[in-house]
Amino acid sequence: MKKFIRLISGMLCAVMMLCTVTIGYAESNEEAPTTTFDPNTDKVWSEAVYMANMDTGDVVYKKNETKKMYPASTTKIMTAIIVLENVRDLRKKVEAPYDCFDEFNGDDPNKWGASHAAIEPLQENLTYLDCLYGLMLPSGCDAANILAYNVGKGNMQTFFKMMNDKAKEIGCTGTNFSNAHGLYEDTNYTTAQDMFLITKYAYEHCPKFWEICGTYEYEMPPNTANPNGYYIYNTVSLINPASMYYYEGAMGIKTGTIDQGGRCLVSAVKKNYTYMLVTLNAPIYDSEGEYYDDWYNMVDAINLYNWAFENFAMATLQEKNEQITEVDVALGENASHVILVPENDFMKLMPKNIDASAVQKTFKKYDMVQAPVEKGDVLGVMDIKFKGETLTSINLVASNSVIRSETEYYIERLKIEVNKTWVKISVVLFVILLICTIVTRTVENSRKRKSRAKERRKYSHYANRR
């Protein structure tokens, strides 16, 4: 019986969705997603956008990415992160006191008509896991408050502080959370870039998050209104096979809609690459205040995903074996120079069919080095630029080794030693000493010769007298 009810419910939802979107495109056919879309020239409905390739980290499109925006129910992404990081056993039961429901019936009209997961006050058979599915699939504000109440140990303000502390830890600079559900409060805001960082964090650290937000339907436990249990469905139409917005490879995540923040969507698609996209404040109403039939956050998503998958691909901009330049080597035994090559390959997500001249390479290197040179020694650096923007800097390394000539080395050392000041001084002093010695000996020898000559004359005179 449950399966039959489930089948009928799914068919009815599909029919209603098809009827709604078909009317929308009939009235506004020119806005339908198209593979020729270019966000640089065509209409992007969302006020703030941030889109990046998750495999490479490259940001491919952004618009008003740091502008203050109201995130609506995309707030629940952070709510889910805090729960997943602070609850060990997701099968554990939660409390659902009236405190978690009161604000939806209070004095603030911004809290009226909140989306919900059909949870009842004081329901005793709910688990953290049920509430997480209730939070992320039908965007249950009741589930958000229940999770905040339980993780916050009965104090939701404690939970909100945990949300803000985590946002700062992640690196958000334009975000503040004042509730767990995203219904309008002036102090509950973010930016497209911050929301990307938050969801990227979930992508990298919370595998259960992706299992939950990528699920289309989930069976909730029974309550008095639904004694046989009931199914909840994901509001991200990109993962609904019956929706005209269905997109192959979509991984779900979160929608959000409030008057002050428009239609919001955080989504991801995995094909040959994985892209993540944040779109905030797509229009809900036209200029005359009439309700738009088209969900332009979904239109933007499809257009941008088509554009990214069709126009970007990984390109090898530099191969590590390419000979770039050479450096002269002094005192080399087997070579007078060494060839420089890049230390590694460099691949980058780039527009397809780019003009090769748009990629510029400049390098700096040593004019000369002294042997020995080892293969792999860093002797230069090369910058790779695209349209004037530096994409990376790569070390240039020696492609081969050059041993040192010992003969030339010691000759060079001798030249160096000879040119040292103390050696020059020593040589001068030695020369002076040598000269002094020569002069002294010359004078002394001259005196001795004179003395001997005198003696000879004296002896000669004496001999003649005899």
Image (cartoon, helix red, strand yellow):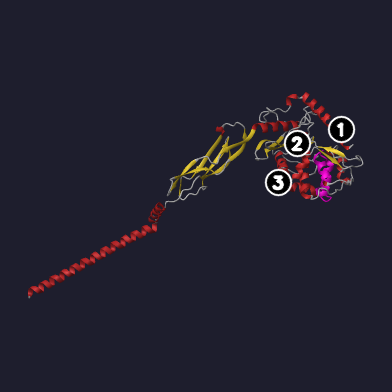
> Which one is closest to the eye, mark 1 or mark 2?
1
Residue bearing the label numbered 2? 265
The amino acid type, in three-letter code, at marker 2 is: Leu
Label 3: which secondary element? helix
Q: Dot 1 surroundings within 10 Å: few (below 14), some, or many (20 or more)?
A: few
Q: Main secondary structure of the magenta part?
A: helix
Q: Is residue 161 above or below residue 281?
A: below
Residue bearing the label numbered 3? 170
Horizontal arrangement in the rendering, residue 54 relative to residue 416 (left or right): right
Residue bearing the label numbered 1? 8
Horizontal arrangement in the rendering, residue 347 relative to residue 215 (left or right): left
The amino acid type, in three-letter code, at marker 3 is: Ile
Label 1: which secondary element? helix
Q: Dot 3 surroundings within 10 Å: few (below 14), some, or many (20 or more)?
A: some
Q: Residue 48: x percent and y percent?
A: 71, 35
Q: Earlier in the sequence, mark 2 or mark 3?
A: 3
The image quadrant of residue 56 is top right
Residues under labels 1 and 3: Cα distance? 43 Å
Q: Residue 172: x percent and y percent?
A: 71, 44
Q: Is residue 417 above or below residue 96?
A: below
Q: Earlier in the sequence, mark 1 or mark 2?
A: 1
